[in-house]
Image: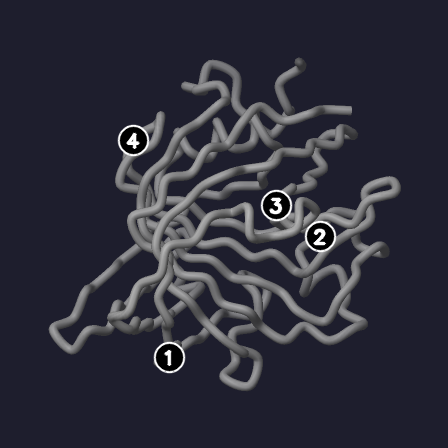
Amino acid sequence: MTMPSSVAHGSSIVPAPWKLRGDGYMLMIKLPLPRGRAELFAPTELAEARFGQFGWVMYVEYASSPVGPYRELLFIPGTFRFGARRLPSITKIYVSTQASVDSGQHNWAIPKERADFDVQDGRDGIKRITLRVQGTIAVELWLRHGTLALPVTASILPHGMRTLGQVMDGRTYQVSPSGHGLMQRAKVVHAWSEPGMFANLAADRVLTAARFSKFELTFPKATVT
């Protein structure tokens, strides 16, 4: 498979499959139709083929991965048409290490970008996340979670929602992660994002939130066409 041009030659790339462990949060947000490409961060090939009025934001702390521990914040603006299928697609994602950027782009065409994460776990139970891109604050996100934890697996989702569709350099990538862990209710205490740098996190956009802890996740090789 040809390396996507957006990955620098000579960089350290760890091929799929990947096994990861960690904790994270998922937010469901309102994203009414229609929305322009700029707000969706979608590539040209997908911008006119979006479905649904909801999107998802995920903040994840990977305790272990094939490229070591790292953090990420990602945005999925609903589903898009991939041939006869409708699949979710990650259109904006920041990670804390360059190794994750390079491998994510190469293995699955996930458009990862490097950013700096400042994360504080307060005694009040609030996790305070500040994300900076080249020194500019792009996102502020404060999260709190409950105590009751229930076991969950990715298999509870329809297969279409478990398969990501990505586009890069004229190729289409499809990958179906699997995993399991614990789920807890969560609450967004404060959220803000700089326009043009991440999804709109205004208070009236956030519908619900959940925390996923002690999860184990497998990202297999992508199917590339």
Quadrant position of residue 209: bottom left
Residue type at tag 2: Ala
Q: Earlier in the sequence, mark 2 or mark 1?
A: 2
Quadrant position of residue 39: bottom right
Check disc 2 and report the residue beneath it.
Answer: 42
Asked whether, in this view, residue 164 is left or right of residue 36, the answer is left
Check disc 4 and report the residue beneath it.
Answer: 68
Residue 198 visible in the snapshot: yes
Marks 1 and 3, Cα distance to the nearest angstrom?
A: 29 Å
**Image marks 4 and 2: residues in contact by CB distance under 8 Å:** no
- Position above or below: 171 against 48: above
Marks 4 and 2, Cα distance to the nearest angstrom?
A: 28 Å
Check disc 1 and report the residue beneath it.
Answer: 190
- Residue 205's spot in the image, x, y percent? 57, 80
* Element type at mark 3: helix
Q: Write the residue at 79% across / 58% down.
A: 50
Check disc 3 and report the residue beneath it.
Answer: 162
**Image marks 2 and 3: residues in contact by CB distance under 8 Å:** no
Closer to the camera in the image, 93 or 222: 222
Marks 2 and 3, Cα distance to the nearest angstrom?
A: 19 Å
Q: Write the residue at 55% across / 52% down.
A: 156
* Element type at mark 4: loop
Q: Write the residue at 88% across / 42% down.
A: 84
Q: Earlier in the sequence, mark 2 or mark 3?
A: 2
Residue type at tag 4: Gly
- Residue 41's spot in the image, x, y percent? 66, 56
Q: Earlier in the sequence, mark 1 or mark 3?
A: 3
